[in-house]
Image (cartoon, rainbow, N blue to C red):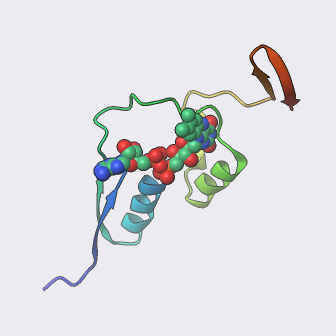
Amino acid sequence: MNHRPKVVVVGAGPAGASLALLLARGGVAVTLVEAGTSLERQFRGEALMPSGLEALAAMGLLELIPGLPHRPLVGWRFVVNGQELFTAS
Ligand SMILES: Cc1cc2nc3c(=O)[nH]c(=O)nc-3n(C[C@H](O)[C@H](O)[C@H](O)COP(=O)(O)OP(=O)(O)OC[C@H]3O[C@@H](n4cnc5c(N)ncnc54)[C@H](O)[C@@H]3O)c2cc1C
């Protein structure tokens, strides 16, 4: 009888996908379930934060980034109703 744990991770967002990857790397049989049937959803990828980069680095995934469409962030300018609130660079 196989007593190795089997896990179902529900939701393939960053948290679920990362958890499934780490479990699979650890030898756990994982099924990752995602309700969405396409990658079309409300846009959520304006910027990859430093903590996100650190998480990708910790998972050994940082080297994938150069192969993805992106551009380095040089600064942000926050404008609401035409009024500039602040800039960050
Ligand atoms: C408008 C917006 C803009 C954002 N911009 C940024 C940004 O620029 N940079 C940044 O770092 N963060 C940004 N965020 C935050 C970022 O999107 C979240 O921190 C991140 O997506 C959270 O990841 P998560 O895996 O916890 O959840 P989610 O990304 O929400 O993933 C959850 C997944 O679970 C699936 N799911 C839910 N219920 C079920 C079910 N019953 N069965 C199967 N699947 C299910 C959903 O379809 C979804 O794919 C933004 C968020 C929003 C809303």
Residue 74 figure quarter: top right
Q: Position of residue 11 (x, y in %)?
A: 36, 51
Q: Is residue 51 visible?
A: yes
> Going 17% across and 82% down the picture, which residue do you hit?
2
Q: Image height check: is 10 above or below 78?
A: below
Task: Name the image quarter holding the C terminus.
Answer: top right
Residue toward you, 63 or 43: 43
Residue at figure coordinates x 56%, y 27% from the top left: 69
Q: Quadrant of the N terminus?
A: bottom left
Name the residue located 28 percent from the left edge and 35 percent from the top edge: 37
Residue at the farthest left position: 1
Give me the residue at 86% from left, 28% from top. 87
The answer to whether residue 13 is seen in the rendering is: no
Who is closer to the viewer here, 66 or 10? 10
Left or right position of 16 against 61: left
- The answer to which image quadrant residue 48 occupies is top right
Q: Position of residue 16 (x, y in %)?
A: 42, 56
Of 85 and 56, nearer the camera is: 85
In the current view of this chain or complex, which residue is farthest to the front? Answer: 81
Is the residue 89 above or below the residue 2 in the image? above
Residue 47: x %, y % from top left: 65, 35
Q: Is residue 60 left or right of residue 75?
A: left
